[in-house]
Image: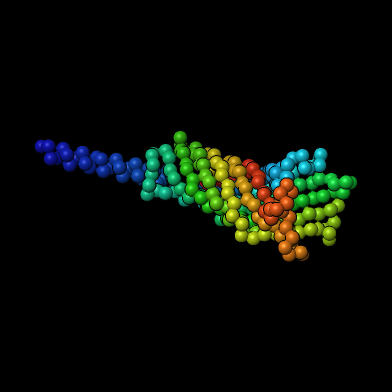
Amino acid sequence: MKKPILILLLCFLSLGTFSQSSSYQKKFDNEFYFRFGYSLPFWSQYGAEQADWEDGTKRLGFTGEVGTIFMFKSIPSTENMALGIDVDYISVYWHKFNTYDESTEVDLWNFRVDTKIGPSFTFNPIDRLAFDVFVKADFCWFTATGIIYDNDMDEMEGYADALTIGLVSGFNVRYSILMVGFEFSTINPQLENTENQGEYLGNINDANSKKSPLPSVNFTVGLSF
């Protein structure tokens, strides 16, 4: 009599384990996403401090990206938590400072194209609601900075760099297919003058550095499926 009961219990346990695993895999499917939003460049870009910028300087920025969160379905932590890898196939950043220097209008803009990858942790407290926390290496394929005086594109000073590695960290809030994100980004390319090789834009407050810090904070909205 004990043997059939033991077999029955084992069957129930196996069924329960299978059910939990199936539920986990269904709840934590891979998430493909695209999003865009506002990217705010820090005053400390190019090594500056806020006091280094003229009064009335304006900052603008935009970011957009497409990626996938790949869930580790084979190693579930708990029913409401999951680990994964967050991959941004392509991310773009555009920043602009508009200022006046001794009656001369100066536009300083920066454009980047990146790929980002790193671990993520997902918490799913209730149905359709999820929070993702991530840290990613930022592989910047191309960075370009232009300095334009009085809107004269012919007199623009251009600087560029390729293959720079930075770091991003942040979190997402997902409800159904809606996705809202917050991200802190930092990268330090060596921006070389496109016409005078060996001349770098560098760091405003460190004459010995060839690197130009480009930190920003990004707020995005988008969809995930």
Residue occupying the point 26% across, 43% down? 14
Residue 174 appears at what percent x and percent y?
Answer: 53, 40
Residue 47 appears at what percent x and percent y?
Answer: 70, 47
Q: State the image quarter where residue 143 is shown.
A: bottom right
Q: Residue farthest to the left?
A: 1
Q: Residue 145 vs residue 10: left or right?
A: right
Residue 136 appears at what percent x and percent y?
Answer: 54, 49
> Quadrant location of the N terminus?
top left
Asked if 93 appears above or below 2 in the picture, the reply is below
Q: Residue farthest to the top?
A: 126
Residue occupying the point 61% across, 46% down? 185
Relative depth, front residue between 123 and 152: 152
Q: Residue farthest to the front?
A: 208
Q: Residue 156 vs residue 184: left or right?
A: right
Q: Residue 221 vs residue 56: left or right?
A: left
Residue occupying the point 76% across, 56% down? 146
Residue occupying the point 63% across, 50% down? 187
Q: Residue 148 vs residue 184: left or right?
A: right
Q: State the image quarter where residue 162 is shown.
A: bottom right
